[in-house]
Amino acid sequence: MTFQKVVQVLTVVNNFRLNSRHFIIDLHAPSPLPNILPGQFAQVLVDDSPSTFLRRPFSIHSVDFGNNTFRLLIQIKGEGTRHLSKLKPGDSLDAIYPLGNAFSLPLTKDVLLVGGGCGVAPLLFLSQFLNQNYVRPTILVGFRTKEEVSEIEAYEKYGNVLITTDDGTEGEKGLVVDHSIFQKERLPFKKIYCCGPDAMMKAVAKIARMHRIDCEVSLENTMACGFGVCLCCITPTDKGNERVCVEGPVFNESRLRW
Amino acid sequence: MKNLSVNIAGLHFKNPVTTASGTFGYGDEFLDFIDLSRLGGIFVKAVTGKNRDGNAYPRMAETSSGMLNSVGLQNKGIDHFCREIYPRIRHFDTHMIVNVSGSTVEEYIEVAERINELEMIPAIELNISCPNVKLGGMAFGTVPAMAAEVTSEVRKVYKKVLMVKLSPNVTSIGDLAKAVVDGGADVITLINTLLGMAIDAERRRPVLSTITGGLSGPAIKPIALRMVWQTHKAVRVPIIGLGGIMNATDAIEFILAGASAIQVGTANFIDPSVSVKIVDGIEAYLDRHKINNVSDLVGALRTE
């Protein structure tokens, strides 16, 4: 599957904090949006500062094709993301999108989505998309603490939501893989989609393998270009080193040699 | 109408703007963004004799006004290039030039011989300057006698335009340039990346899996300009200049320093349409300065 990629100057229509570390930015395109699927990402140019020289990749959090806007969920990690968090409505932002492959459509209705921290970003768009395809998934999302638990109502529109927090201030205490749903002898899922820190995805993939459940993960390796030419974001797979930005970011975990 | 064409070792380029190997894939990755026929040429990703997996992740570190990479010449080898890639790119209406690398002189010869037979590839660029491989690469490009040897051995089997890409990681770029010209190089391209390093202080670890890597981007432009200028004074063959070119003004600076053409590298990662914007910008510069031929600017730096 190939997509028309565009380089566009987008207009910020909304920029608000979800909590002290995460914010949401809504971007309006000057022309009708190209086809975008869940799992794909945008490469965003921060500014002309020498220390934020390269673009930053962000998963597309949700899309409103009717209004030509899409949404990014961003965690403040360094100078680049801090700068983006301060953009005001009306400001412009240069982006290349849509990039990468997408989550595949499930061949079952027994679907589990697992997201940790900022890794929940592509899962809202995915759950929206699954609903359009008559699948109502279970959505397990993990956060550090109650203050960071956010957008639960948005997820609840599309599926049955389960929550963990590291400190137990909301939902079950612990990491997503500690959730009681995984303690059952037989898991009621035939497909898992997962996005979050590598350690979390590896742990979820291990559980999936144990239960012989098909599992797709979305990687976020550091990259320079985002469209397949710098070869910096590679991950070892059953076919050798593959590009996270083109062959990924979504991989079936069974193919990864991580 | 301004004349942007340049003649390099008998090859006619429609304009002096080309794209650097390793930053432009095989060209077709850019079809969504630009019309490739607007470019003077495309230097495709390095090809070696055998498949190479390249180095382990992480391969990239962002630095001030630049980046470090340690890709390590990942490619599927010459057989795959001839069979799968060449048929896909041969019809592009611009000079498709192949960057050739290897671990041994024999490997360079093998790849060059194979590419010599590809009708639509008018030139090769010998990569004796990659800093990210243990054997070959830069090891050939930092000692004049070895640079001359690999060039002259390839010269024996390669009949078309032979370009040699030099490393900046040397004391005297002029000595290297003279050595490869003596070895039979028709054109010199420079500079490849500068050997550098990035450290994650919190983790007390190197950022790159290989510890060191190649620095590119505008951070290296002043060094690249200086080396193009010194090479222009040292040898008489045409020069293709690169190193941190982000816009048309940068490109003009390289041409004034003595480059007959330029390569756009790291800038492609940030703006995949930048190369075509540079073509337009050079034309605007010629208009503004009432100069008819871009070739009149080559080495036209006023130093008196």
Image (cartoon, coloured by chain):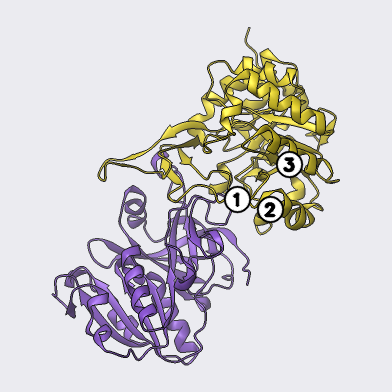
Chain colours: A purple, B yellow
Q: How many marks?
A: 3
Residue at image position (61%, 32%) is B242
Residue at image position (43%, 47%) is A47
For residue B29, what is the image quadrant?
A: bottom right
Q: In the rendered view, does B189 fall on the left or right side of A163?
A: right
Disc 2: CA contacts within 10 A as few (<14), some (14-19) or many (>=20): some
Given this view, does label 2 or label 3 mark the residue nearer the observer? 3
Circles 2, 3 touching at the beta carbon (< 8 Å): no
* Cα distance between the residues tagged 2 and 3: 30 Å
Residue at image position (59%, 61%) is A6
Residue, disc 2: B34
Compared to residue B102, the image places residue A55 above or below, namely below
Circles 1, 2 touching at the beta carbon (< 8 Å): yes
Q: Position of residue A32 (x, y in %)?
A: 58, 71
Residue type at mark 3 is Val
Compared to residue A164, the image places residue B162 above or below, namely above
Q: Secondary structure at mark 1?
A: loop
Residue, disc 1: B272
Residue type at mark 2 is Ile
| Residue B111: image tag | 3
Query: Which comes sooner in the sequence, label 3 or label 1?
Result: 3
Q: Are marks 2 and 3 on the same chain?
A: yes
Q: Secondary structure at mark 3?
A: helix
Given this view, does label 3 or label 1 mark the residue nearer the observer? 3
Compared to residue A55, the image places residue B214 above or below, namely above
Q: Secondary structure at mark 2?
A: loop
Residue A150, visible in the rendered structure: no
Disc 3: CA contacts within 10 A as few (<14), some (14-19) or many (>=20): many
* Cα distance between the residues tagged 3 and 1: 29 Å
Q: Tell me the quarter of the image containing the N terminus of chain B.
A: top right
